[in-house]
Image (cartoon, grey):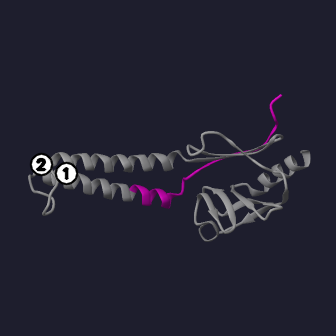
Amino acid sequence: MPPEILFREDQQFRQPILWILLLGGSAFCIGTIVWMISRQVIQGIPFGDDAMSNDQMVALGGVIIGLNVLILWLVGALKLQTEVTSGGLFIRFKPLHRKTRKIDLNDVTSVASVKYRPALEYGGWGIRRGRHGTAYNVSGDLGVRIDYENGYHLLIGTRYPDELKAAIDQCLSAG
């Protein structure tokens, strides 16, 4: 029989300001590349005193546009999956993690729902390691902090901190 799912949440980067900055920066970058290529290749006006050849300009433009598209795809595809089952706590940050990672719940001293400051305490969002421990977060300022006997702690960002804490507590009491 498969383990009982006590909590499950998928989160993605959906903050409007993030996407405005990413899309705006990409549009500016791609627009500049297109303007440079059209000026040199179509209009015949060399770009700069020591201009690249037309082939070099087009190749460089293609690489830069490709990198922009790759970055946009990666941020759009990033997904933090958190699951608590009767078998433990599992995290996966797709597509960075190929496999789901089981979080060790041995030697846990406390589990708490917290409000935290992602930028100040962990340096932002994503998979972050800082002076306060390790954090897996995507957005917001709510999470669950797990403290261990050795002083290490783990923070998992969530929109539902009380529910995640209750599920972890239930998993700890069962195990």
- Identify which amino acid the numbered label 1 is placed on: Ile
Q: Is residue 95 above or below residue 166?
A: above
**Residue placed at 72% from the left, 59% from the top?**
154
Q: Within 10 angstroms of label 2, few (less than 14), some, or many (20 or more) residues?
A: few
**Residue placed at 26% from the left, 57% from the top?**
32
Q: Are marks 2 and 1 in contact (CB under 8 Å)?
A: yes
As drawn, which residue projects farthest toward the left?
Answer: 44
Instruction: Locate the C terminus and report the quarter of the image it occupies.
Output: top right
- Identify which amino acid the numbered label 2 is placed on: Ile
Q: Which residue is mark 2?
A: 42
Q: Within 10 angstroms of label 1, few (less than 14), some, or many (20 or more) residues?
A: many
Q: Position of residue 115 (x, y in %)?
A: 71, 66
Q: Is residue 91 magenta?
A: no
| Quarter of the image where one finds residue 131 | bottom right
Q: Which residue is mark 1?
A: 37
Give the distance between the C-alpha atoms of the residues marked 2 and 1, in whole angstroms. Answer: 7 Å
Magenta span: 1-23
| Quarter of the image where one finds residue 99 | top right
Q: Left or right: where does residue 115 sit relative to residue 172?
A: left
